[in-house]
Amino acid sequence: MRAAALYTAAGSLLLTTLAAAPAGSAPRSPAPPEASGTAVAVARAAVRGVEFGPCDGAGQDLPGRMECGTVRVPLDYARPGGRQIELAVSRVRATQRDPGNSKHKVPRQGALVFNPGGPGASGFHFPLVGRLPEWKRIAAAYDLVGYAPRGVGRSAPLSCRDPKDVFKGPTQAPTHPSESYKRERIAQAKAYARGCAERSGDALRHYHSLNNARDLDVLRAALGEERLTFLGSSYGTYFGALYATLFPSHVRRMVFDSAVNPDPAQIWYRNNLAQSAAFEERWTEVKEWIARHHGVYGLGETEQAVQRSYDRARARLAAEPAGGKAGPGQLQNLFLQAGYYDDYWPGRAHALSAYLKGDPQPLVDLAAPRREAAAEAENASAVYTAVECNDAPWPTQWEVWDRDNTRLARVAPFETWDNVWMNLPCAYWAAPRQQPLDVRTGPGELPPTLILAAERDAAAPYEGALELHRRLSGSVLVTERDAGTHGIVGGPNACVNGHVEAYLLEGRVPGRRAACAPHPEPEPRAAR
């Protein structure tokens, strides 16, 4: 009986959604099956809701008032009555108390849904940020809602290989790889792509950004929200932009933090080339900061001298990994993370300095892979690969990858080839590819949306924020000048946080563009 009632409600909404055009108007082209399937799934979710309760399993150790539940979505939106998968959802209710005046009750503004990016990252623990001072005013007004997107964590998890094979030991990371090394990595990429196909079968094709956007609308309906309030970071800005294009009338407020370039021609091969080029500039900034603090770290008084110190460490680690666990690949990854977040700079610089002075332990502590994290890392990598490979066409000839990245590595050696190896399975992908949606909204289609970007962000280069701003009519761009941290909401910049609070709490936005001075650089210290 319950199933029949759900399908009846879904059918009623679907008929309303797909009603014939008024007499005398031009006939509409038939809606694609995914559109009608989304309407069915949304209607079912609106009836079912989310049965939140105590967190169990992976969430049982979460503190405070965190609640957990699930939302069912179709694996394939073209067949909404077919296989369903469950997305893990979490929530902390709005406190409804102004942190500046605990006696002052604030009006509840609904649910704020968050996605941290990836692809492959989980927002399941997001509601706990309400405990931080920077989030307390937002947490007073909004139910903070996190979830694990399809494929991630407990949400119909994807896997491409045995997690035991993830961390096999120290790795190399040549900035100018030999032909034999390239052949080795090509073989690994082919094997990885085969593993993804073998482990997931036909289901693999349904893990992509368009379905992530559709899932978001189902989640909105399940939460009982007529319109969505959403905060997406990094990759979350991309499928958030897809959502705004597909469902503009369902948007209440949207914050795009560290925006990805949504131009269909950039998804995803060219975006990765742009990212590799940007990381070279960011790596130079890291070295310049270390050089300014030569008195603390002793790694060189110029950027070039710091590079020589780094190269000495790479050569030594190639000959003998630190603690038998950290090789050049682990060192490179450690400083790649520093390119994302400048609060990592002091700890990374200290580890490099200590290693060159004969103490490898700080480097081992930071860089050595953690076996207990292997399953999570394997899952995140599988989702990242599946989504990016499924989202768009990729070059299928190695010669194209080799030509483009050999040229780029001459001027940007730091991250170029590492980025290639991460994405190369897409050259040998078996599942069908999507054609990227042309992200675009016209005047009046969307309420004002807020785009945030650090001017020197390497993971999501600034051009992406400018492009998204051009494509979303009525959007407002807030730039943190002369800064490069990836993800700036809730960080140390009070100006940025003020714009976010004004927008989420009051709907206020600055002019079409606004700027914030950079947050202070980190202070040098011996350990993080």
Image (cartoon, rainbow, N blue to C red):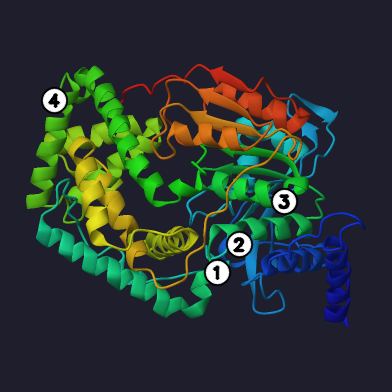
Instruction: Choose the circle earlier in sequence order: 4 or 2.
Output: 2
Number of residues whose C-alpha sits closer than 10 Å to that of mark 3, classed few (under 14), some (14–19) or many (20 or more): some
Number of residues whose C-alpha sits closer than 10 Å to that of mark 4, classed few (under 14), some (14–19) or many (20 or more): some
- Residue appearing at x 56%, y 67% in the figure: 154
Residue 379 locus on image (x, y percent):
44, 64
Marks 1 and 4, Cα distance to the nearest angstrom?
A: 49 Å
Q: Which mark is residue 305?
A: 4
Looking at the rendered structure, the kind of residue marked 4 is Ala
Q: Which residue is under mark 2? A: 211
Q: Which residue is under mark 1? A: 206
- Residue appearing at x 64%, y 79% in the figure: 83
Instruction: Choose the circle earlier in sequence order: 3 or 4.
Output: 3
> In the figure, 320 relative to 215: above or below?
above
Q: Which mark is residue 229?
A: none
Give the SS element for disc 3.
Answer: loop
Tag 3 and tag 4, C-beta contact below 8 Å: no
Looking at the rendered structure, the kind of residue marked 2 is Asn
Quadrant of the rendered structure where residue 70 is? bottom right
Marks 3 and 4, Cα distance to the nearest angstrom?
A: 52 Å
Looking at the rendered structure, the kind of residue marked 1 is His
> In the figure, 15 relative to 325: above or below?
below
Number of residues whose C-alpha sits closer than 10 Å to that of mark 2, classed few (under 14), some (14–19) or many (20 or more): many
Q: Mark 3 or mark 4, which is nearer to you?
A: 3
Tag 1 and tag 2, C-beta contact below 8 Å: yes
Marks 2 and 3, Cα distance to the nearest angstrom?
A: 13 Å
Instruction: Evaluate whether residue 528 shows in this view.
Output: no
Q: Which residue is under mark 3? A: 247
